Amino acid sequence: MDKLILLKHIESQIEVTDLVLSQIVSYFENETFGKKEILLPEGSNCNKLFFVSKGCLHLYFYDSLGNKKTTQFAIENWWLTDFLAFQKEGVSNFYIEAVENSEVLSISSMNLKQLLADFPQMEKYFRVIYEIAYGSALMRLKYIYSYSKEDIYFKFRDDFPDFIQRAPQYLIASFLGLTPEYLSEIKKKEVS
Amino acid sequence: MDKLILLKHIESQIEVTDLVLSQIVSYFENETFGKKEILLPEGSNCNKLFFVSKGCLHLYFYDSLGNKKTTQFAIENWWLTDFLAFQKEGVSNFYIEAVENSEVLSISSMNLKQLLADFPQMEKYFRVIYEIAYGSALMRLKYIYSYSKEDIYFKFRDDFPDFIQRAPQYLIASFLGLTPEYLSEIKKKEVS
């Protein structure tokens, strides 16, 4: 069932036959993670890329004061890892944790290399995925640099209502560079 | 001469024959831009992707107070555009300007589509480029969220000494989310 979600997503981005799709799935593993379970600890070898078929993951680190800072979320149809470390097969600069109970398809760096060698059309799929992800990261930097702390929350709420519904408030605060107390204040204004 | 730099870069990332390389170049145009010349204005149709063969470009916007904010730099061997707008062939959310006299290879979205259709091996090249760029953008968010304003400059100086040497100080300040005055203060401490 999980794998169908990935295959549908691949089909939505590239032209691919049913036969190829049925072969692609064998490179992936189904994994399930409970809420707050760690998929990848910071400082460990980053050799897995994750596709969310159900649930929500986040990529985070601890700042010098020991606060958890969320750098990226991933809900259904999104990919997540420490991409820089994954490409170099190096040590992760981030943690990845399940925000809620999640079903994930994972692929090791070795399997991904093999998949791309066996099915070069998957290069296009990942090219498109990373192009959008990179473009979105630059847009997020624009938000961070251009909106006031209050406006950034409202802008984010309007652009990504799904996240606001399901992610805990402290994670949204961290993602937007706000303290949980400050976000709480903003949300009180929203209600009143 | 400019085109050779691009071909060498492509060769460094993917396996490709000399014949293919000689055909790829015809999809690109040589362009030169003077210092402070605008390559892409915000609000215009974003249908070009730029490869820097000499010089330096930056992607920026104006915040609500009218301050120029640099979201991304590109020196030799880097690609630059508003990637989100380029992919959708939509309106740019950023300006692109030459920081210094620059030589650039540009490709239109139409030509890039044709290039990828004619030479699917170029999908791998761009997949790798975007994977690194996206991973780096996430690392930059980690810097912004984790270092103090002073530390972020020193970290950046140590990681990217080339940028510090050649980019004007006001652009570096903007890129790091600092005011030019604040960066000036930090740099005074550096000397003393």
Image (spheres, coloured by chain):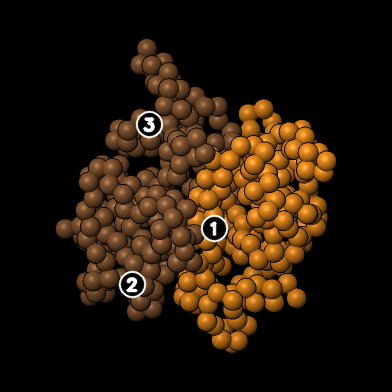
Chain colours: A orange, B brown
From mark 3 to mark 2, how far is it between C-alphas? 35 Å
Residue assigned mark 3 = B170
In the rendered image of this protein, does residue A63 appear above or below residue B92?
above
Label 3 sits on a secondary structure element that is helix
The verdict on a common chain for dots 1 and 3 is no
Which quadrant of the figure contains the N terminus of chain B?
Answer: bottom left
Is the Cβ of the residue at disc 3 closer than 8 Å to that at disc 2? no
**Which residue sits at x=70%, y=51%?**
A157
Is the Cβ of the residue at disc 1 closer than 8 Å to that at disc 3? no
**Which residue sits at x=38%, y=31%?**
B170
Q: Position of residue A160 (x, y in %)?
A: 68, 55
Residue A58, can we see it? no
Label 1 sits on a secondary structure element that is helix
| Residue type, numbered disc 3 | Tyr
In this rendered view, identify the residue nearer to me: B85 or B44.
Answer: B44
Mark 3 belongs to which subunit?
Answer: B
Mark 1 belongs to which subunit?
Answer: A
| Residue type, numbered disc 1 | Ala
